[in-house]
Protein backbone atom coordinates (compact mmCIF):
# COMPACT_ATOMS: atom_id res chain seq x y z
CA UNK A 1 0.00 0.00 0.00
CA UNK A 2 1.22 3.48 -0.85
CA UNK A 3 2.18 5.66 2.10
CA UNK A 4 -0.14 8.69 1.86
CA UNK A 5 1.63 10.99 4.34
CA UNK A 6 4.05 12.55 1.81
CA UNK A 7 1.16 13.24 -0.57
CA UNK A 8 -0.80 15.05 2.14
CA UNK A 9 2.30 17.07 3.06
CA UNK A 10 2.83 17.95 -0.62
CA UNK A 11 -0.82 19.02 -0.96
CA UNK A 12 -0.57 21.09 2.22
CA UNK A 13 2.65 22.81 1.14
CA UNK A 14 1.29 23.49 -2.36
CA UNK A 15 -1.87 25.08 -0.99
CA UNK A 16 0.26 27.18 1.41
CA UNK A 17 2.35 28.42 -1.53
CA UNK A 18 -0.77 29.58 -3.40
CA UNK A 19 -2.32 31.08 -0.25
CA UNK A 20 0.72 33.02 0.90
CA UNK A 21 1.90 33.88 -2.61
CA UNK A 22 -1.53 35.25 -3.45
CA UNK A 23 -1.62 37.32 -0.28
CA UNK A 24 1.80 38.78 -1.09
CA UNK A 25 0.73 39.60 -4.67
CA UNK A 26 -2.38 41.34 -3.34
CA UNK A 27 -0.43 43.36 -0.80
CA UNK A 28 2.15 44.43 -3.39
CA UNK A 29 -0.39 45.30 -6.08
CA UNK A 30 -2.42 47.41 -3.66
CA UNK A 31 0.71 49.44 -2.91
CA UNK A 32 1.27 49.91 -6.66
CA UNK A 33 -2.24 51.34 -7.12
CA UNK A 34 -0.89 54.75 -6.17
CA UNK A 35 1.13 54.76 -9.40
CA UNK A 36 -1.74 53.76 -11.70
CA UNK A 37 -3.96 56.22 -13.55
CA UNK A 38 -7.40 56.57 -11.95
CA UNK A 39 -9.01 54.86 -14.95
CA UNK A 40 -7.05 51.64 -14.29
CA UNK A 41 -7.44 51.44 -10.50
CA UNK A 42 -10.95 49.99 -10.41
CA UNK A 43 -10.10 47.31 -12.99
CA UNK A 44 -7.01 46.34 -11.03
CA UNK A 45 -8.98 46.17 -7.77
CA UNK A 46 -11.61 43.99 -9.46
CA UNK A 47 -8.88 41.67 -10.77
CA UNK A 48 -7.36 41.42 -7.28
CA UNK A 49 -10.77 40.60 -5.85
CA UNK A 50 -11.21 37.82 -8.47
CA UNK A 51 -7.75 36.50 -7.56
CA UNK A 52 -8.88 36.40 -3.94
CA UNK A 53 -12.13 34.59 -4.66
CA UNK A 54 -10.80 32.12 -7.21
CA UNK A 55 -7.33 31.29 -5.88
CA UNK A 56 -6.37 32.73 -2.49
CA UNK A 57 -9.50 31.84 -0.48
CA UNK A 58 -9.74 28.27 -1.86
CA UNK A 59 -6.00 27.82 -1.19
CA UNK A 60 -6.49 29.01 2.38
CA UNK A 61 -9.34 26.53 2.89
CA UNK A 62 -7.27 23.69 1.43
CA UNK A 63 -4.33 24.70 3.63
CA UNK A 64 -6.54 24.41 6.71
CA UNK A 65 -8.10 21.14 5.51
CA UNK A 66 -4.79 19.39 4.78
CA UNK A 67 -3.11 20.88 7.87
CA UNK A 68 -5.83 19.72 10.26
CA UNK A 69 -5.90 16.31 8.59
CA UNK A 70 -2.14 15.94 9.09
CA UNK A 71 -2.30 17.16 12.70
CA UNK A 72 -5.07 14.70 13.59
CA UNK A 73 -3.47 11.84 11.68
CA UNK A 74 -0.05 12.34 13.29
CA UNK A 75 -1.37 13.19 16.77
CA UNK A 76 0.31 16.60 16.88
CA UNK A 77 -2.43 18.57 18.67
CA UNK A 78 -0.70 18.20 22.04
CA UNK A 79 2.61 19.50 20.63
CA UNK A 80 3.56 23.03 21.74
CA UNK A 81 5.09 23.83 18.32
CA UNK A 82 1.74 23.13 16.63
CA UNK A 83 -0.21 25.26 19.09
CA UNK A 84 2.11 28.21 18.44
CA UNK A 85 1.90 27.56 14.70
CA UNK A 86 -1.90 27.50 14.85
CA UNK A 87 -2.01 30.86 16.63
CA UNK A 88 0.09 32.38 13.85
CA UNK A 89 -1.97 30.65 11.14
CA UNK A 90 -5.18 32.04 12.68
CA UNK A 91 -3.60 35.52 12.63
CA UNK A 92 -2.54 35.03 8.99
CA UNK A 93 -6.07 33.92 8.10
CA UNK A 94 -7.41 37.00 9.88
CA UNK A 95 -5.04 39.20 7.88
CA UNK A 96 -6.39 37.55 4.73
CA UNK A 97 -9.91 38.42 5.85
CA UNK A 98 -8.88 42.03 6.46
CA UNK A 99 -7.22 42.26 3.04
CA UNK A 100 -10.27 40.74 1.34
CA UNK A 101 -12.66 43.06 3.13
CA UNK A 102 -10.64 46.14 2.23
CA UNK A 103 -10.50 45.06 -1.41
CA UNK A 104 -14.27 44.49 -1.49
CA UNK A 105 -14.95 47.90 0.06
CA UNK A 106 -12.44 49.56 -2.28
CA UNK A 107 -14.18 48.15 -5.35
CA UNK A 108 -17.58 49.33 -4.08
CA UNK A 109 -16.68 52.73 -2.63
CA UNK A 110 -13.23 53.71 -3.82
CA UNK A 111 -11.71 53.49 -0.32
CA UNK A 112 -7.98 53.05 0.06
CA UNK A 113 -7.38 49.28 0.47
CA UNK A 114 -3.81 49.57 1.82
CA UNK A 115 -2.95 47.55 4.91
CA UNK A 116 0.41 48.96 5.92
CA UNK A 117 2.94 46.34 6.88
CA UNK A 118 0.91 43.41 5.50
CA UNK A 119 3.77 42.10 3.34
CA UNK A 120 6.23 42.16 6.23
CA UNK A 121 3.73 40.44 8.53
CA UNK A 122 3.07 37.72 5.93
CA UNK A 123 6.78 37.02 5.39
CA UNK A 124 7.57 36.97 9.11
CA UNK A 125 4.58 34.70 9.82
CA UNK A 126 5.71 32.27 7.14
CA UNK A 127 9.27 32.26 8.46
CA UNK A 128 8.07 31.31 11.94
CA UNK A 129 5.49 28.80 10.63
CA UNK A 130 8.02 27.06 8.38
CA UNK A 131 10.57 26.88 11.18
CA UNK A 132 8.04 25.40 13.59
CA UNK A 133 6.73 22.90 11.02
CA UNK A 134 10.09 21.63 9.81
CA UNK A 135 12.20 21.86 12.96
CA UNK A 136 9.46 20.99 15.48
CA UNK A 137 11.62 22.50 18.24
CA UNK A 138 9.43 21.46 21.19
Image (spheres, rainbow, N blue to C red):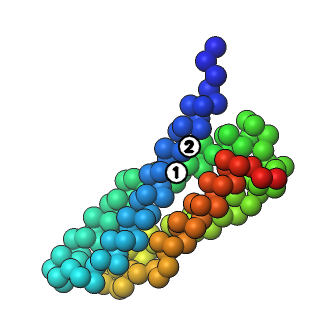
Other residues around mark 1 within 10 Å, as few (<14) / some (14–19) / many (≥20) = many
- Return the residue nearer the eye: 8 or 52: 8
- Total marks in image: 2
Residue 87: percent from the left, percent from the top?
A: 70, 63
Callout 1: SS = helix
Quarter of the view holding residue 7: top right
- Return the residue nearer the eye: 69 or 136: 136
- Residue shown at 70%/54% (left/top)? 132
Q: Note whether 18 is above or below 93 in the view shown.
A: above
- Residue shown at 35%/85% (left/top)? 111
Residue 6: mark in rendering? none
Is residue 95 visible in the rendered structure shown here? Answer: no
Residue 137: percent from the left, percent from the top?
A: 77, 52
Residue 14: percent from the left, percent from the top?
A: 49, 44
Q: Note whether 106 is above or below 28 in the view shown.
A: below
- Residue shown at 59%/35% (left/top)? 8
> Which residue is identified by label 2?
12
Report the residue that reaches farthest toward the top. 1
Callout 2: SS = helix
Residue 56: percent from the left, percent from the top?
A: 43, 56
Name the side, left or right, on which 117 lies relative to 90: left
Is residue 44 visible in the rendered structure shown here? Answer: yes
Circle 2/circle 1 CB separation < 8 Å: yes
- Residue shown at 28%/79% (left/top)? 33
Whole-number angstrom distance, CA of label 2 to CA of label 1: 6 Å
Name the side, left or right, on which 15 lies relative to 94: left
> Which residue is identified by label 1?
16
Amino acid sequence: MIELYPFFVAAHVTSVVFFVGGMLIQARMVLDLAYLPATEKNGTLSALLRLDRQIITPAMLLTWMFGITLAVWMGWFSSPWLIIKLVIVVALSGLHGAQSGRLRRAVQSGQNPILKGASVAIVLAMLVIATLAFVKPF
